Image: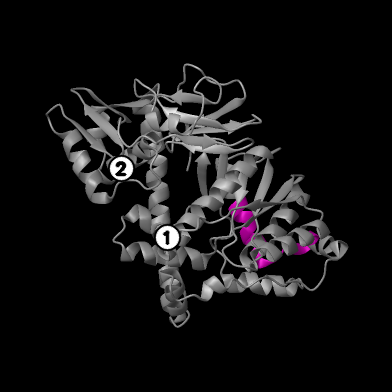
Amino acid sequence: MRTSFDSKAHVKKNNSLLETPVGRTFIDAMKCVEHRMPLANTKIAVAVSGGSDSLALLLLAQAWSQRFGQKVIAFTVDHHLRKESTQEALSVQKYMQALDIPHEILQWFPPENLQHGHIEKVARTARYERLTEACWRHEARILLVGHTQNDQIETMLLRASRKSSDFGLAGMSVLRFLHPYLAVARPLLKVTRFDLQHFLKQNDVLWFADPSNENPAFKRVLLRKALLHVHREIYQDLVLVSRFYAIERRFYTIATIRFLKESACIIGMRIKIKIAPFKAASLPLQQHILRRIISCVGGKMYPPNKQQLSQACEKISSLECVQFTLGRTIIDKRKASFTIFREKRHIPPVVQLAPKDLICWDGRFWFYSIAVHPYWIYPQKGKTDPDFYKEGMTAKKNSFSLNMEGQSPSFPHNITYIAASIENIFKDW
């Protein structure tokens, strides 16, 4: 994987890494992140797989931390999808020790019945769950990931093939909150994979090549290979299109936050919005407002599509008082306002909260256990879920229930409530 574990050589080079073209682009991106999320006295976590993108990111983050006096910690997820993954993770750990960077290997074992077509999605979800939990334990409030310009173009084209909205075509954002106290930043979205590999070669750093990136069974791999044969001018046009959608999304994000601060209020786990200013807004802004609220209140990973949002805006703007569901929420429209809250369907079944573990219940509430034994969380339904007793647990000692507001009549003292997704409503993401 690498040519040397001489930490002194790398530390010496770190002083000039930020002066390279890649380094300057990284600095610009981090300044944009810092404008939206203050980084002073913030520990920075970096997801490092051992590939070229994440290793370059790690070196840049270390150089950044040395210049601005911040702490960096690295995490590697051993996904056990390939027999080489454990050895690769250990090699990354050895390299981190040479660089004097704190590092932890996070384990994930794929389920035995995992279908091939679902590997990418399930592994990605599990990876972010492990990284989120590790960031919380180590008090890191920002997680850097190594997505590149190539990844951005691929994402835009894949979403276009699924007839995504303009919001989706904007691709990945530079900053996104996983929960109110942890943000994911992508400071390499304007850097190509070729430039990163050139950057590593100049600094005598080798990397692992993941064979799954060559597997034609994945649509992204086929698209990536096709883009290699695209004329440079056409590729640059795709970059411009991607940035146009990103600028458009940014414009509506700022407008949405301004609208919500002026015309909406949080009541418990509900959002109440004034009708008049909503009807005065343009249709695209109305859609962005609903998308943000429904994502925070409904807790689903993906928001409703453009057609569903348009139909919802039409119903809200009508003269009638109506109530309808969308994205696991109920939209209750009255004469002067409408309220959006979580519907009482599709509630999670009984889930286990293991010791020293962090989970997100219902896609809306984050909890962390400092207990020495597992706890079981079950939804309040007027009576205890019968499946709960099949596990042989005692409701008094090892469990607690949650209602739709994320509240419990018997909340254990050794379970830490972290945050609710509704707290993201006014954040700049």
Callout 2 crowding tier (Cα within 10 Å): few <14, some 14–19, many ≥20:
some
Q: Viewed as shown, does residue 418 lie left or right of 241?
A: right
Of residue 41 and residue 207, the one placed in the foreground of this image is 207
On screen, residue 112 above or below 354: below
Q: Does the residue at mark 1 contact the one at mark 2 (Cβ under 8 Å)?
A: no
Magenta residues: mostly which secondary structure?
helix
The image position of residue 381, as x and y in percent, is 35, 24
Answer with left or right where residue 116 lies relative to residue 68.
left
Q: Amino acid at mark 1?
A: His
Q: Residue at x 51, y 28 (%)?
A: 393
Residue 28 colored in magenta in the image: yes
The residue closer to the viewer here, 123 or 299, is 123
Does dot 2 land on a helix, a strand or a loop?
A: helix
Q: Secondary structure under badge 1?
A: helix
Q: Residue furthest top?
A: 409
Residue range corresponding to the magenta coloring: 14-30
Quadrant assignment for the N terminus: bottom right
Left or right relative to 418: residue 303: left
Q: Which residue was labeled with disc 1? A: 118
Q: Nearer the viewer, residue 83 or 184?
A: 83
Q: Position of residue 392 (x, y in %)?
A: 49, 30
Residue drawn 74% across the image and 47% down it = 68
The numbered dot on residue 285 is 2
Q: Position of residue 154 (x, y in %)?
A: 44, 67
Q: Position of residue 28 (x, y in %)?
A: 61, 55
Say which residue appears at 47% left-offset and 36% top-offset: 351
The residue type indicated by label 2 comes to: Leu
The colour scheme is one colour
